[in-house]
Amino acid sequence: MIDTRLIERHAARAWPAEEVREEDGWLLRHTPGVPRRRSNSALPVGRGDGLLSGIERVEEYYAGHGLPVAVQVSPAEEHAALDAGLDARGYRKDGEVLVCTAPSAAVADAARPATPLDVVLAEHPTGAWLDAYAALEPSGSGRAEAEQLFRRITGPAAHLGVERDGRLVGIGLLVAAPGCAGVFCMATDPAHRRQGIAGAILHVGARWAQARGAGTLYLQVTAENATARRLYERLGFEVSHSYHYRLKP
């Protein structure tokens, strides 16, 4: 089992913000034009009571960028004191997310489709993949923002997709790190769901991860997304830890 803090470090590098600073035990992240909260929030990377003493610097940083203050309390199970301190300061809780892990070999086996599907894999995002991401991404990132976002990813990556009628109707992204790989951007066009597309993408992605020595996969899924959680559980993913956000009024 990979250490939960290490997973969060890997996840932050795999999905890099445009501006990243580490100060007083905090990773401060800011990405102009991208609404995704993970790209514009502070992640605690230190330990102990010193985190709360550094919260004023966090607030100054986001105020200086004209942004609301968002703290990603992760791993939530290891930051109970920080969470309570933010609650006492009036920060409201929002957006519970489960972080799940599974052996790459187990996912590759469990996700093997009964009827083979052609899955396209590219180390760099193609124009068609970026178009599909912009169309399927619920956060509302546009095509231009997507190009900038994926240009910042420096780790070995697999951009996966399934094509129907000349366009990609399902996509996924894996980013490898030493010993593990993160699963991101899993999305399927609503008109093509329940056809095994997500499973086929994870099958190919897990095999890609194995070939790069990434024996563990991790992913993030919102607690309320019951459909995705059932899929991931069926493929062998188990909850490693959770996180949520604390938002300053």
Image: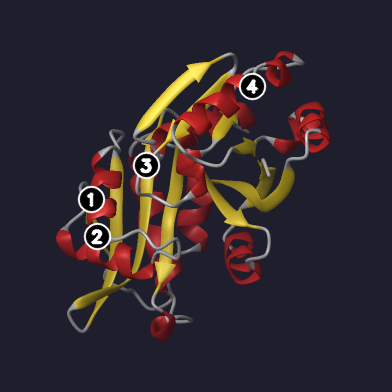
CA distance for labels 4 and 3: 33 Å
CA distance for labels 2 and 1: 6 Å
CA distance for labels 3 and 1: 16 Å
CA distance for labels 3 and 2: 20 Å
Give the residue at x 33% y 47%.
Answer: 208
Identify which amino acid the numbered label 3 is placed on: Val
Identify which amino acid the numbered label 1 is placed on: Glu
Task: Bin the neighbour count of mark 2 within 10 Å (Cα to Cα): few under 14, some 14-19, many 20 and up.
Answer: some
Between disc 4 and disc 2, whose residue precedes? 4
Residue 56 appears in which quarter of the rendering? top right
Q: Which residue occupies the foreground of this view, 9 or 17? A: 17
Q: Name the residue under label 2.
A: 143
Asked if disc 3 and disc 1 are in contact, CB closer than 8 Å, the reply is no
Residue 231 appears in which quarter of the rendering? bottom right
Asked if disc 2 and disc 1 are in contact, CB closer than 8 Å, the reply is yes
From the viewer's perspective, is 33 left or right of 105? left
Give the image location of residue 90, x and y in percent: 78, 39
**Closer to the eye: label 4 or 2:** 4
Q: Name the residue under label 4.
A: 56
Give the residue at x 35% y 49%.
Answer: 33
- At mark 1, the secondary structure is helix
- At mark 2, the secondary structure is helix
Asked if disc 4 and disc 3 are in contact, CB closer than 8 Å, the reply is no
- Residue 21 appears anywhere in the view: yes
Q: Which residue occupies the foreground of this view, 58 or 24? A: 58
